[in-house]
Image (spheres, rainbow, N blue to C red):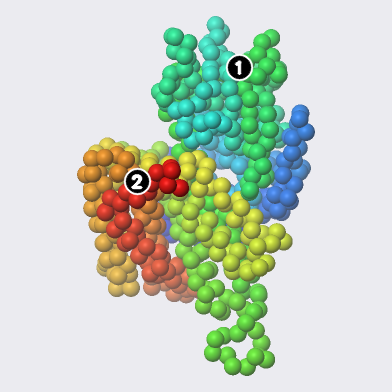
Amino acid sequence: MQSKIVPRRDLDFLLYEWLNVEALSSRARYADHSRETFNAAMDTCEQIATELFAPHNKKSDQNEPHFDGETVHMIPDVKTALDAYIAAGLMAAGQDYDFGGMQLPVVVEKAGLAYFKGANVGTSSYPFLTIGNANTLLKCGTPEQIETYVKPMLAGRFFGTMCLSEPQAGSSLSDIVTRAEAQEDGTYRLTGNKMWISAGEHELAENIVHLVLAKVPGADGKLIPGVKGISLFIVPKKLVNADGTLGERNDVVLAGLNHKMGYRGTTNCLLNFGEGKFKPQGKAGAIGYLVGEVHKGLANMFHMMNEARIGVGLGAVMLGYTGYLHALDYARNRPQGRAPQAKDPAAPQIAIIEHTDVKRMLLAQKSYVEGGLALTLYCAKLVDDERTAESAEVREKATLLLDILTPVAKSWPSQWCLEANNLAIQVHGGYGYTREYNVEQFYRDNRLNPIHEGTHGIQGLDLLGRKVSMKNGAAFAALGGEMQLTVSHALQVPELEAYGNALGLVLRRIAAVTKTLYGVGDTNKMLANASLYLEAFGHAVVAWIWLEQALLAVGKSGHDADFYRGKLQACAYFFQWELPKTAPQLDLLESIDTTTLDMQDAWF
């Protein structure tokens, strides 16, 4: 029976036929690996996700964690699943052998993570955040910090979080006011509040390692305005003794749980630092340990933030993907109505998958989720190239491509794979709107993804305001070159020539519109419609991703012919129905429309 999380055939196509992941085994870091070891890792992920994560997805949604004033309680299935994840070595799957890792390529590690995100996005958030926290400290921490905090996280003894937002600041990190006062022993004492902290409190691990953004006051005792004053700190829930044993409770307290529309299996917290409920070493104030240099905290935190953004995109994809597979199964098995030309009302009803409008909705979902999965795995492969490619030129290009694609990889799936969930409900009809069917939960869970790790609007500002112009447009040029190369290949294939021409035209228009926007000379006007730019840009990127897949699928026959025909039909849908949406968007951008910019508060 086909998985309702993600088809293995699609993952195999993307990993082995498109991204040529097997070739990574020629690099020193992955020399011990082969397709067999990659498949074994994928098999393990699929098994644990299917048998232990998916079964309690609905249960944890209906029985969300609750706080009794002292302890957070959750269903035991969560810990059972996470213990199996840890026992399989998956927390350290991509890490060095020295850390007990498997040294899997990032692209294989993320393909495995896809199973867990699709099976149970709430439970999978705990290892997802822990791995990101550990990766950040591996880049920015001291050897002592790595020994004390990273190794226990990769062993699954400690879990990790990221603490950025505050109640009064939200996404505006320049306005955070959590304060870090230097102490004589080299530590810091933190006071303040952090809001929306996923996995911020639980009893799933021995300890929780919080990575906290806070401001060290200047010589005048005042906090430095803006992001330049931000530093990064390790603030553990429990202090760790020199011998690695756990010490006393730090002054970090759960003030309350946020009650979300979806993602209910992940505790989401308001944390108070330094309120004095606990007095480590005899006084109030949460003890923190500086990561990297003072006032360089945001740059260090971006390691975790960028990893999280691509991870959010993957999570959005997988919620859309599992919703699509549920809708597909329902459509194949739900008899209702008859073909428009049928005249006999007594004739048997047909499965709704035979109705053209249902095919439209399923095909749209397929184009969104398979395109989104390909995009996120492509970005994961770029991380491998950035770290391990033998050529400096290849490494540098990978960095440029990853920089410009990160806002797209976060935002495009968050918008369009959410739309896939919307269509999955519609395919189910009235049943889809009930809690008895899974698709309504998938929609609620996925609705968070356009918000967290930088909203849709923030990603638009990042793309248009920073990424397309960075290094004198080097990233923009690198991506354009890759996309144009695909166009040139498609122009040599009669079945794909029209798609190559269509994408080539859009690429030229995006280049021209970008030049026009940067020529305005008014930042407010240039960025007024940045979200629309992001959407048009993102659709062009995913059209490119689909054309890449079509080039591999065209002309294929044999026992897998239906798989490849499905790829070609989804590509056709995207080029016929989706890519044309960019034309009016680019027209509007080129006109430097100020309708929204000119709107005044009083006019609402």
Instruction: Give the image location of residue 500, x and y in percent.
Output: 29, 65
Q: Is residue 248 above or below residue 345?
A: above
Task: Residue 524: give its label.
Answer: none
Q: Is residue 281 above or below residue 603?
A: above
Callout 1: SS: strand
Q: Residue at 54% of width from left, 90% of height from top?
A: 341
In the image, what residue type sits under mark 1? Ile
Q: Residue at 65% of width from left, 23% of height from top?
A: 252
The residue lying toward the viewer, choosing from 215 and 438, is: 215
The residue that label 1 is drawn on is 287
Q: Is residue 545 above or below residue 347?
A: above
Q: Residue at 35% of width from left, 51% of height from top?
A: 595
Is 524 placed left or right of 549 in the picture? left
Instruction: Give the image location of residue 445, x and y in percent.
Output: 61, 50
Find residue 134 and report its image quarter.
top right
The Cα–Cα distance between marks 2 and 1, rounded to whole angstroms, is 47 Å
Using the rendered image of the protein, determine whether residue 553 is visible from the camera's viewpoint: no
- Badge 2 crowding class, 10 Å Cα cut-off, few under 14, some 14 to 19, many 20 or more, is few
Is 31 placed left or right of 162 in the picture? left
Using the rendered image of the protein, determine whether residue 285 is visible from the camera's viewpoint: yes
- Badge 1 crowding class, 10 Å Cα cut-off, few under 14, some 14 to 19, many 20 or more, is many
Q: Going from the N terminus, do you reach mark 2 or mark 1 first? A: 1
Instruction: Give the image location of residue 593, x and y in percent.
Output: 30, 51
How many marks do you count on the picture?
2
Callout 2: SS: helix
Instruction: Give the image location of residue 43, x and y in percent.
Output: 60, 53
Quadrant the N terminus occupies: bottom right
The residue that label 2 is drawn on is 598
Task: Specify the farthest residue to the front.
Answer: 602
Is 264 placed left or right of 597 in the picture? right
Q: Residue at 63% of width from left, 48% of height from top?
A: 261
In the image, what residue type sits under mark 2? Asp
